Amino acid sequence: MISDPIFYAIAVLAVVIWGISKAGFGGGLGLISVPMLTLVIPPLEAAAIMLPILCVMDLFGIWGYRRTWRREKMGVLFAGVVLGTIMGALTFGSVNEAVLRLVIGVMAVAFSIQFFFANDTFLKGSRPGPTVGFAVATVAGVASFIIHAGALPLLAIYLLPQRLDKTFYVGTAMVFVAIVNFAKIPPYAMLGLFTREALQTAAILLPFAPVGIWLGMWLHKRIPDRHFTRLINAIVVIIGIKLILDAVISLAG
């Protein structure tokens, strides 16, 4: 079990930030949580510690949004995530992570720019169908497994043009991310990432998970509907730029 107090100071903050992000906006800002932990521990260890915590957060979040998610959208997303996770597990270690980050980052920024400048007539007539949903979920499954990021910007490409109410958007995103996280448990276990130390550390941090979820739901209720879509779009841009910068730095090095 990790005993470094500096680690726990950073880890508690990371867990709370991720919970706020998941329950308030459907995810996204949690992108900084694993990098925060990698300041003091290796990336794979950070991911193994966070995954059980994220799964518990997902259960709290799904309960909180249990009546506000679009079930008709979930079948195609579920199928894509399962396929993507399997692909991610099979190609783990052989895919160039920097290139994957770059591709997803460019997709996220390009979509956000298009969405920002699109007029209402364009948006009302351009709701992506099941094929796009399946493709987005598949890539999200691969990306989430290999680089622990990318699910939210990819999901936004499918969900934002659906023009959902803000609470239905977050509820649907919560269920989607839960599928992504729970689908990663078997391959993580088979790869031996769930060490005793990782699970013990996760157990210590677990009580902070519902705190983040509660704060996120509290914040969500106070964001006006008219600002929510713009906020999500801004988060997608930030994530996309970060992924691009990380990729460029990695490829240049």
Image (cartoon, rainbow, N blue to C red):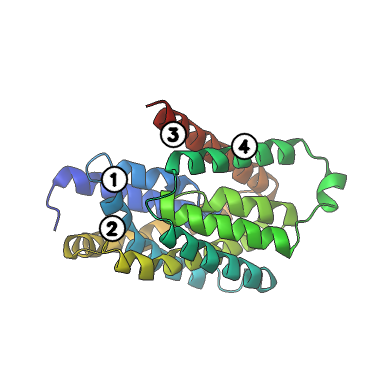
In the rendered image, the vertical position of residue 65 relative to residue 159, given as above or below: below
- State the residue at coordinates (37%, 46%): 33
Q: Is residue 125 left or right of residue 22?
A: right
Q: Considering only order in the chain, which callout, 4 or 3, is on the residue closer to the N terminus?
A: 4
Mark with earlier residue (4, 2)? 2
Q: Are marks 1 and 2 in contact (CB under 8 Å)?
A: yes
Residue closest to the far top? 252
Q: Nearer the viewer, residue 238 or 57?
A: 238
Residue at image mark 2: 49
Amino acid beneath label 1:
Leu
Residue matched to label 4: 109
Residue underneath mark 3: 246
Q: Is residue 16 above or below residue 114?
A: below
Q: Residue drawn at (68%, 41%), measured in percent from left and top?
A: 111
Amino acid type at mark 3: Asp
Q: Amino acid at mark 2?
A: Ile
Mark 3 or mark 2: which comes first in sequence?
A: 2
Q: CA distance from mark 4 to mark 1?
A: 26 Å
**Type of the residue with mark 4:** Val
**Distance from Cα at disc 1 to Cα at disc 2:** 10 Å
Query: Marks 3 and 2, how far apart in space?
Result: 22 Å
Residue ID for mark 1: 37
First in sequence: mark 1 vs mark 2: 1
Mark 2: secondary structure: helix
Residue appearing at x 49%, y 61% in the figure: 87
Q: Position of residue 155 (x, y in %)?
A: 60, 55
